[in-house]
Image (spheres, rainbow, N blue to C red):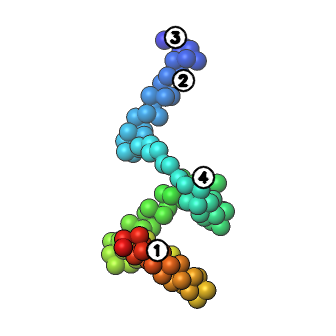
């Protein structure tokens, strides 16, 4: 039996790795993040002392799955979109009223 070349050993290693990943159901996903989401992921990595963002994402998915199995309403709360509350100051409200009334008056004159 002849010794394998470096290229043959490397090819065999790649084949074994591809077979292993296939057995595990491995798949690669492309993920596009906006800056605030990337910042949140970086913060989670830092707080949890994770080196790889993929590790945080994997753990979050499995944790969310466990929550969903135990209590779907808690999962719904977890993934619900947080709406930012908008409040208008009294000064701004008065200005909008004044400018709105002026615009309405201008439109009324233009229609007459």
Q: CA distance from mark 2 to mark 1?
A: 79 Å
In-front residue for pair 43/71: 43
In-front residue for pair 23/4: 23
Q: Residue 88, located in which quarter of the rendered image?
A: bottom right
Q: Which residue is mark 3?
A: 2
Q: CA distance from mark 1 to mark 4?
A: 60 Å
Judged by depth in the image, the label closer to the viewer, 2 or 4, is 4
Residue 85 is tagged as none
Query: Above or below — where is 33 with respect to 40?
Result: above
Which of disc 3 and disc 4 is earlier in sequence? 3
Which of disc 1 and disc 2 is earlier in sequence? 2
Q: Residue 56, located in which quarter of the rendered image?
A: bottom right
Which of disc 3 and disc 1 is earlier in sequence? 3
At x 42%, y 40%, the residue is 21
Q: Which residue is mark 1?
A: 106
Q: Which residue is mark 2?
A: 10
């Amino acid at each position: 039996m002849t010794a394998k070349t470096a290229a043959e050993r490397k090819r065999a290693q790649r084949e074994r790795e591809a077979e292993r990943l296939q057995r595990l159901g491995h798949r690669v996903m492309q993920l596009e993040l906006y800056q605030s989401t990337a910042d949140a992921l970086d913060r989670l990595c830092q707080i949890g002392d994770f080196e790889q963002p993929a590790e945080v994402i994997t753990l979050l998915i499995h944790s969310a799955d466990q929550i969903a199995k135990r209590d779907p309403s808690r999962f719904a709360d977890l993934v619900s979109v947080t709406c930012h509350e908008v409040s208008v100051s009294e000064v701004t409200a008065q200005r909008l009223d004044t400018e709105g009334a002026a615009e309405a008056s201008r439109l009324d004159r233009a229609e007459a």
